[in-house]
Image (cartoon, rainbow, N blue to C red):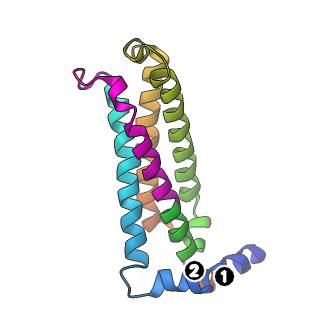
Amino acid sequence: MAALFAVLGSIESSALSTWLRESPSLLAFPLMLSVHAIGMGLAAGINAAVALRVLGVAPAVPLDGMQPFLRVMWAGFWMNAASGIALLIAYPTKALTNPDFYLKLTLIALALASVRALDRRVFRTSAAREAALEPVVRRLAIASLTCWAGAIIAGRLLAYTYTQLLASWR
């Protein structure tokens, strides 16, 4: 455990971590939080729109016309990944000692797996409308919605459920 806190402490004492955490610049922590929120909106929001359409919401919207939005969803995911790494560098102890962080990552991985499966089953076939009616596709849509909602909640709870903010505060 002492070795873990030594590694976390060395990350926290790096110039990048200190700048992200302590700089008054809007380009530091506030920008990373903003990019993270925008990326989450794109990733989870577009995924939710596709999943809800698969579940029968807005039947007049052609399902196969939604496939190009998945590229934007992936762009949002990569925005989240990059900004999430920056946020992790700012407060590694806060995140890496919190089980909630690992729950968030697990739910994101499951959400991404479900959207990839939806993409293969719905958009990579010639009959998107018929594919959306399959029970397995509907279960994937429900799983996707559930995982994204859980990941967002777990991520938000990270601000309140940590037990150790910085390694140096032991």
Mark 2 lies on residue: 166
Q: CA gap, disc 1 to disc 2?
A: 7 Å
**Image quadrant occupied by the N terminus:** bottom right
Type of amino acid at the residue the image marks with label 2: Leu
Which residue is rendered at x = 47% and y = 46% of the image? 74
Magenta stretch: give its range.
56-81
Report the side of 91 relative to 139 (left or right).
right
Which of the two residues, 101 or 126, is positioned nearer the viewer here? 126
Q: Secondary structure at mark 1?
A: helix
The C terminus, quarter of image: bottom right
In this rendering, the answer to whether 132 lies above or below 9 is above
Q: Is residue 90 magenta?
A: no
* For residue 139, above or below residue 156: above
Q: Quadrant of residue 29?
A: bottom left
The kind of residue on which mark 1 rests is Gly
Q: Is residue 97 visible?
A: no
* Helix, strand or loop for disc 2: loop
| Magenta stretch, main secondary structure class | helix
Do the numbered discs 1 and 2 sit on residues whose CB atoms are within 8 Å? Answer: yes
- Residue 9 numbered tag: 1
Q: Residues within 10 Å of mark 2 (few under 14, many from 20)?
A: some
For image coordinates 60% across by 73% down, the residue present is 93
Residue 140: x, y in percent? 48, 27
Name the disc covering residue 62, or none: none
Mark nearer the N terminus (1 vs 2): 1
Q: Is residue 155 left or right of residue 167?
A: left
Q: Residue at x 52, y 52 (%)?
A: 104
